[in-house]
Image (cartoon, rainbow, N blue to C red):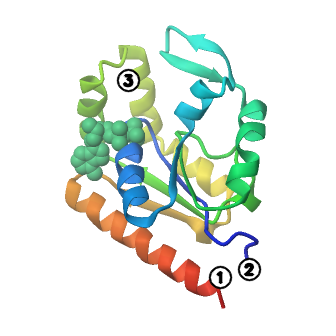
Amino acid sequence: MASRSKPNIIVTGTPGVGKTTHCEILAENTGLKHFSINEVVKDRGCHDGYDDEFKSWIVDEDKLLDAIEDEVKQGGYIIDWHACDLFPKSWIDLVVVLRVDSTLLYDRLKARNYPEEKLQENLDSEIMEVLLQEARESYDEEIVVELTSNSTEEMDSNVARIESWLAQWKKNNTE
Ligand code: DAT
């Protein structure tokens, strides 16, 4: 039995798969806290500066883990980040890897005005299943779930599925 009264969930996947959108709906519906690691890195200074070419923060993982440890260990967080292998196994109860068709991903990243190199790198990452591999290598296979996020219908069904997982987790952990 977990030591926390609420579980921690990672929602991961290539940028543009729909992590933020899923997490916001889930947080609204469940009361779990949406933890956007991007925001945490920025707001709490867990970085070694900004990479102008890739338009992203250079994350200091040790600083990040120190900054969030006390909160996350209490449970009840939905961690939203395009990496997952840095979070200790003992913190995490479910890892959701969102997937999307590459043509849709291209359109979503193009709409965000990603620089061409960054766009291509992310498309390659999705096609090569980088995040799925990372999740499977970092956590027990029974807690890693791959879900597709091509349409709003799929998103609704993903949210419903995660909510029923949450209800079951609560049942199993309050007996
Ligand atoms: P991420 O947080 O993974 O970078 P996001 O939630 O910001 O992704 O979504 C990127 C864009 O794609 C945004 O305009 C919403 C849209 N989108 C995400 N998931 C979708 C889905 N399942 N169906 C339709 N549109 C989706």
| Amino acid under disc 3 | Leu
Badge 3 density bin: few <14, some 14–19, many ≥20, Cα 10 Å: many
Left or right, residue 23 beside residue 65: left
Whole-percent x, y for residue 42 in the image: 58, 25
Q: Dots 1 and 2: beta carbons under 8 Å?
A: yes
| Amino acid under disc 2 | Met
Residue 17 can be seen in this image: no
In this rendering, is residue 3 above or below 100? below
Left or right, residue 75 beside residue 116: right
Q: Quadrant of the N terminus?
A: bottom right
Residue 60 can be seen in this image: yes
Toward the bottom, the furthest residue is 175
In this rendering, is residue 4 above or below 62? below
Residue 119: assigned label: 3
What's the CA distance linking mark 3 and mark 1? Answer: 42 Å
The reply to whether the residue tagged 1 has its Cβ within 8 angstroms of ligand 1 is no
Q: Which residue is mark 2?
A: 1
Q: Which residue is mark 1?
A: 173
Q: Quadrant of residue 174?
A: bottom right
Q: Quadrant of residue 162?
A: bottom left
Count of numbered tags:
3
| Amino acid under disc 1 | Asn
Whole-percent x, y for residue 48 in the image: 69, 16
Badge 1 density bin: few <14, some 14–19, many ≥20, Cα 10 Å: some
1 or 2: tag closer to the N-terminus:
2
Left or right, residue 133 beside residue 154: right
Q: Secondary structure at mark 2?
A: loop
Question: Which numbered mark, 3 or 2, is in the foreground of this view?
Answer: 2
Badge 2 density bin: few <14, some 14–19, many ≥20, Cα 10 Å: few
Quadrant containing ligand 1: top left
Please state which of residues 133 and 91 is positioned toward the viewer in this rendering: 91
Please state which of residues 96 and 103 is positioned toward the viewer in this rendering: 96
